[in-house]
Image (cartoon, rainbow, N blue to C red):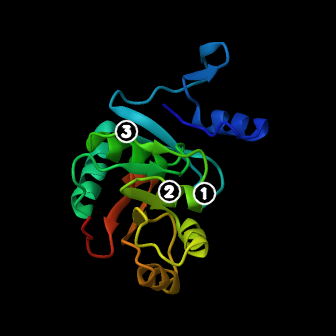
């Protein structure tokens, strides 16, 4: 599977398909062969399009085993209990959004899916965990000065300013910062201690 955003402009979609060369493409008429497509190894579950530092799309091949290992390590590090609910308000064509789905599945729950990020919707979601990027955390802080009732936050995708982290923690956020890249299935480690639910 090669997830691409539905809102991708035609020129960008054609460029991505030409660069990533899937064997089939889902259209309104169903699954159709794609000319010049290259098959991936049998153990690859998903190909994530990433531009890295060049701007040209590249395909990162991730196995189901790698996705499970990363999600299992994250759940263990967070101390997440079985049945914990995950909110996904990140794009599902990025590894960060995909991993929210895998964490929820491994925890035995269905994720709460939001098509876009809304600070109020995060606060009202009833989720136990949410993955955010620093810009989203800033918007959440701007919405309310009290994050103690907010889902526990797994923060990654970019370096967060120390002032943002301090302000979020002072507002009561249960926050764990992560680092990683698409090639490592996203947040492959945490740089702060675990929190308890």
Mark 3–mark 1 distance (CA, rounded to whole Å)? 20 Å
The mark nearer the N terminus, 2 or 3, is: 3
Q: Which residue is mark 2?
A: 124
For image coordinates 22% across by 61% down, the residue present is 79
| Residue at image location 29% in from the left, 50% down from the top | 84
Query: Can I make out residue 35 in this image?
Result: no
Under circle 1, the secondary element is loop
Frontmost of labels 2 and 3 is 2
Q: Left of 99 or right of it: where is 1?
A: right
Judge from the rendering whether residue 65 lies leftward or rightward of residue 156; answer left or right. Answer: left
At which x and y percent is residue 180? 41, 62
Q: Say which residue label 1 marks.
A: 118
Question: Tags 3 and 1 in contact by the CB under 8 Å rule?
Answer: no
- What's the distance in space between the residues labelled 1 and 2, CA to CA? 10 Å
User: Do the CB atoms of the residues marked 1 and 2 lie less than 8 Å apart?
Assistant: no
Residue at left 38%, top 60%? 187
Q: Is residue 90 above or below residue 6?
A: below
């Amino acid at each position: 599977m090669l997830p691409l955003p539905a809102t991708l402009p035609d020129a960008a979609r054609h460029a991505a398909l030409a660069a990533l060369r899937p064997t089939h493409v889902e259209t309104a008429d169903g699954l159709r062969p794609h000319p010049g497509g290259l098959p991936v190894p049998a153990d690859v579950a998903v190909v994530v399009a990433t531009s890295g530092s060049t701007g040209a799309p590249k395909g990162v091949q991730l196995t189901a085993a790698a996705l499970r290992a990363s999600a299992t390590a994250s759940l263990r590090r967070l101390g997440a209990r079985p049945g914990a609910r995950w909110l996904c308000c990140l794009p599902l064509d990025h590894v960060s959004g995909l991993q929210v789905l895998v964490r929820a599945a491994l925890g035995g729950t269905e994720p709460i899916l939001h098509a876009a990020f809304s600070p109020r919707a995060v606060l009202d979601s009833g989720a136990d965990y949410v993955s955010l990027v620093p810009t989203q955390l800033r918007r959440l802080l701007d919405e309310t000065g009290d994050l103690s009732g907010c889902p526990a936050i797994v923060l990654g995708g970019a370096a967060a300013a120390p002032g943002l982290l301090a302000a979020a923690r002072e507002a009561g956020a249960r926050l764990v910062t992560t680092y990683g890249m698409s090639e490592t299935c996203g947040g492959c480690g945490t740089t702060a201690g675990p929190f308890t639910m």
